[in-house]
Amino acid sequence: VRMLVESFAQGGLAASGFTSAGAALAAIRRSPPDVVVTDLGMTPIDGITLAREARLIAPAVAVIALSGAVDPEWEVMRW
């Protein structure tokens, strides 16, 4: 998380990092971002659920979902 935030900052972008989906959703409610980058394999709330909830709060938000793992149960979707 920290590396992504630092990389965005070096590119001149404002960024915040969160280690839980709950904290990220609270921040999205306070101030909707332009982009959400999430890990699909987070627990207890996974990245797909975070993306869906983020889009309910801020329908225009773009979502980038990443993962270092592969799970055949994950569905490919376009939000």
Image (cartoon, rainbow, N blue to C red):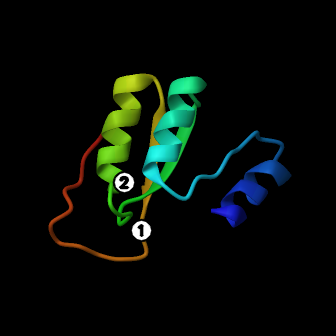
Q: Is residue 25 left or right of residue 34?
A: left
Relative depth, front residue between 28 and 11: 28
Q: Is residue 1 left or right of residue 40?
A: right
Element type at marker 2? helix
Q: Is residue 41 above or below residue 70?
A: above
Element type at marker 1? loop
Relative depth, front residue between 31 and 37: 31
* Residue 49, horizontal then vertical, whole percent: 29, 46
Q: Please give the name of the residue rendered at 48% of the width and 55% of the height, measured from the top-left corner.
A: 20
* Residue 62, horizontal then vertical, whole percent: 47, 35
* Residue 15, horizontal then vertical, whole percent: 71, 44
The quadrant of the picture occupied by the N terminus is bottom right
Q: Quadrant of residue 74?
A: bottom left
Residue position marked by numbered label 2 in the rendering: 47
Q: Please give the name of the residue rendered at 64% of the width and 52% of the height, measured from the top-left corner.
A: 17
The residues tagged by marks 2 and 1 sit, at their Cα atoms, a distance apart of 9 Å
Q: Count residues near mark 2 (Cα–Cα under 10 Å), then give few for <14, some for 14-19, many for 20+.
A: many
Q: Is residue 33 left or right of residue 3?
A: left
Disc assigned to residue 67: 1
- Do the residues bearing badges 2 and 1 touch, measured as CB atoms within 8 Å? yes
Q: Count residues near mark 1 (Cα–Cα under 10 Å), then give few for <14, some for 14-19, many for 20+.
A: few
Q: Please give the name of the residue rendered at 43% of the width and 75% of the height, measured from the top-left corner.
A: 68
Observer-side mark, 2 or 1, equals 2
The answer, for residue 23, to whether it is visible in the render is: yes
Relative depth, front residue between 73 and 23: 23
Of pointers 2 and 1, the one earlier in the residue sequence: 2
Relative depth, front residue between 67 and 43: 43
Name the amino acid, label 1.
Answer: Ser
Q: Is residue 73 above or below residue 51?
A: below
The answer, for residue 79, to whether it is visible in the render is: no
Name the amino acid, label 2.
Answer: Gly
